[in-house]
Amino acid sequence: MLAVASSARVAAAWRVLATVPDPEVPAISVCELGIVRDVIDHDDVLEIVLTPTYSGCPATEVIEHDILQAIESAGLGPARATLRRAPAWTTDWISSEGRAKLLAYGIVPPGPASGALVPIRFFSRGATTIALACPRCGSRHTERLAAFGSTACKATWRCLACKEPFEHFKPL
């Protein structure tokens, strides 16, 4: 009977966490972003396991606060957050729903990171950068303006067809 109650509590926690927005890109939840790795019921406390997008992410503390507040508000607490930095977060962990929401929000989602034949490069080293499709008009007549955007994980691009700037979430 205890296992059923524990399982229901964990399932309820996942439903609550799916509603917690990422503080830097509020169109996507922390679950869709793939930073919530596990929910463990220790009977006396729920443990929420998080992997930050990178070790220096300034939003980590805000995310911890927001998820713990959401769990407490749902009556599922007490809870604690545990940071698990290995394996390192990758953009491959962003769900397909999250990718669709990023695009609808105006941010081009990253391509696959694992299995890539070339390492991540911030400078093209002589090769031309592949043009991205504009999230607003779909044109591939685009250019990268800066390797870093509003956060280190995004680059700033501009569509030459509709003249609108947009961000690209870089594959990591």
Image: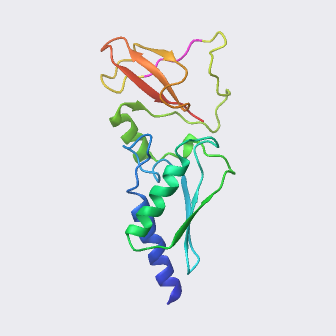
Looking at the image, which residue is at 47% across and 17% down?
A: 131
Q: Position of residue 155 (x, y in %)?
A: 50, 24
Query: Which residue reaches farthest bottom?
Result: 1
In the figure, is residue 98 to the left or right of 90? left
SS assignment for the magenta stretch, majority: loop
Q: Which residues are magenta?
A: 128-132
Q: Position of residue 30 (x, y in %)?
A: 46, 51
Q: Quadrant of residue 161?
A: top left
Q: Is residue 146 above or below residue 54?
A: above
Q: Is residue 87 above or below residue 112?
A: below
Question: Between 50 and 90, which is closer to the camera in this rendering?
Answer: 50
Looking at the image, which residue is at 62% across and 12% down?
A: 127
Looking at the image, which residue is at 56% across and 33% down?
A: 171
Looking at the image, which residue is at 41% across and 63% down?
A: 70
Q: Is residue 77 above or below residue 165?
A: below
Question: Between 104 and 35, which is closer to the camera in this rendering?
Answer: 35
Q: Position of residue 117 (x, y in %)?
A: 67, 29
Q: Position of residue 12 (x, y in %)?
A: 41, 70
Q: Quadrant of residue 170?
A: top right
